[in-house]
């Protein structure tokens, strides 16, 4: 029943920006941990950002602090990630994920590809 559908990825030059979207359905949006996680080519999953939708607490990996911003439009059950000043090494498949308890990832989207290249 739970569905997470990412969009907004694309090809950008180094230093460019993108706004990623995650459309959520099949669960009550409020009261969940929502995450953005990425996987670069040949590498493992890397947690990027998180938001608790009960109180809108936000968290970021050190590597993206000051450049990325997670946000929601709760009335639309939507999660966003504004990504600025992109670096070439941040080329990755970016996933939206959900956890009901904060201890594990319960649901994943299909991912949206972000390619940073000149």
Image (tube, grey):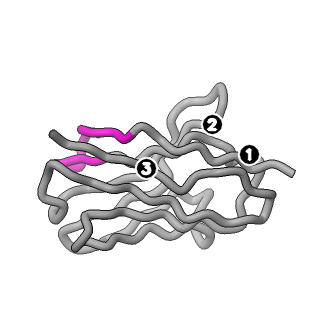
From the viewer's perspective, tell me whether residue 111 is left or right of residue 4: right
Marks 2 and 3, Cα distance to the nearest angstrom? 16 Å
The quadrant of the image that shows the N terminus is: top left
Q: Residue at x 50, y 35 (%)?
A: 45
- In the structure shown, which secondary structural element does the residue marked by tag 3 occupy? strand
**Which numbered disc, 1 or 2, marks the residue that appears first in the sequence?**
2
Q: Is residue 11 left or right of residue 117?
A: left
Q: Nearer the viewer, mark 1 or mark 3?
A: 3
- Dot 1 or dot 3, earlier in sequence: 3
Chain-order first, disc 2 or disc 3: 3
Marks 1/2 in contact by CB < 8 Å: the verdict is yes
**Closest to the observer, 24 or 62:** 24
Q: Which mark is residue 89?
A: 1
Per the image, the residue denoted by label 2 is 40
Whether pointer 1 and pointer 3 mark residues with C-beta atoms closer than 8 Å, the reply is: no
Q: CA distance from mark 1 to mark 2?
A: 8 Å
Q: In which quadrant of the rendered view does residue 66 lie?
A: bottom right
Q: Secondary structure at mark 2?
A: loop
Residue at 38% over, 58% down = 50
Q: Residue at x 70, y 46 (%)?
A: 115
Is the residue 84 above or below the residue 40 in the image?
Answer: below
- Picture layout, residue 8 above or below residue 46: below
Question: Residue 91: x percent and y percent?
Answer: 68, 44
Q: Badge 1 local density, few (<14 within 10 Å), some, or many (20+)?
A: few
Which residue in the protein does label 3 denote? 6
Q: Within the magenta stretch, is there residue 16? A: no
Q: Which residues are magenta?
A: 98-109
Q: Nearer the viewer, mark 2 or mark 3?
A: 3
């Amino acid at each position: 029943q739970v569905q997470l559908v990412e969009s907004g990825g694309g090809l950008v030059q180094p230093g460019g920006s993108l706004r990623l979207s995650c459309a959520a359905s099949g669960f009550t949006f409020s009261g969940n941990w929502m995450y953005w996680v990425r996987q670069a080519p040949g590498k493992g999953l890397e947690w990027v950002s998180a938001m608790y939708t009960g109180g809108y607490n936000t968290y970021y990996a050190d590597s993206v602090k000051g450049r990325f911003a997670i946000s929601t439009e709760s009335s639309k059950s939507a999660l966003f990630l504004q990504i600025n000043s992109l670096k070439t090494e941040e080329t990755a498949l970016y996933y939206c994920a959900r956890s009901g308890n904060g201890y594990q990832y319960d649901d994943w989207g299909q991912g949206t590809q972000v390619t940073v290249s000149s």
